[in-house]
Image: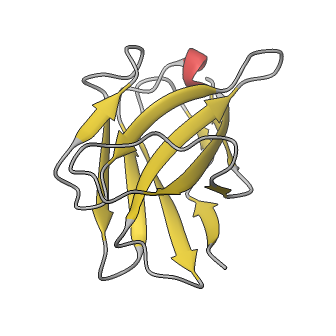
Amino acid sequence: QLQLVESGGGLVQPGGSLRLSCAASGSTLDYYSIGWFRQAPGKEREGVSCISSSGGNTNYGDSVKGRFTISRDNAKNTVYLQMNSLKPEDTAVYYCAARVSYSRTCLWPNKDSYWGQGTQVTVSS
């Protein structure tokens, strides 16, 4: 059974940076497409970024393009989300999720995929 654990969240000032990690156990991530999502209080869950199983294809939500970078290290069974130029509106609980995929393109995880427990990111001065 695949298990995902997010880490790296915290409090950061506007304009600052954080790197989130999504560490997997119980199975290799080699055949999973990974997505990062976030949910702010009172708002719907939003897809932030997605990376294909090989890492060769990535997608980003419009609100984070040019500021966030997703990457993966399959040898470490970990996916990362580098977040730069953070804004107060980036404040949310961030989740990673994994979906089985043999496609060269990113396949966004869905409600039936494997999900982590989330990590809080707060951007505030």
Identify the residue at horizontal 27%, vertical 52% (top origin): 103
Identify the residue at horizontal 40%, vertical 48% (top origin): 81
The single residue placed furthest to the left in the displayed view is: 56
* In the image, residue 17 above or below residue 3: above
Q: Position of residue 90 (x, y in %)?
A: 56, 24
Left or right of 74? Residue 57 is left
Left or right of 22? Residue 71 is left
Q: Position of residue 2 (x, y in %)?
A: 62, 75
Q: Position of residue 26 (x, y in %)?
A: 60, 85
Residue closer to the observer: 69 or 107: 107
* In the image, residue 2 above or below residue 45: below
Identify the residue at horizontal 39%, vertical 57% (top origin): 101
Residue closer to the observer: 90 or 124: 90
Residue closer to the observer: 22 or 82: 22
The single residue placed furthest to the right in the displayed view is: 42
The C terminus - image quarter: top right
> How is the rendered protein coloured?
secondary structure
* In the image, residue 115 above or below residue 46: below
The single residue placed furthest to the front in the displayed view is: 102
Q: Position of residue 1 (x, y in %)?
A: 67, 79
Left or right of 54? Residue 43 is right
Identify the residue at horizontal 68%, vertical 58% (top origin): 116
Count the numbered circles shown. 0
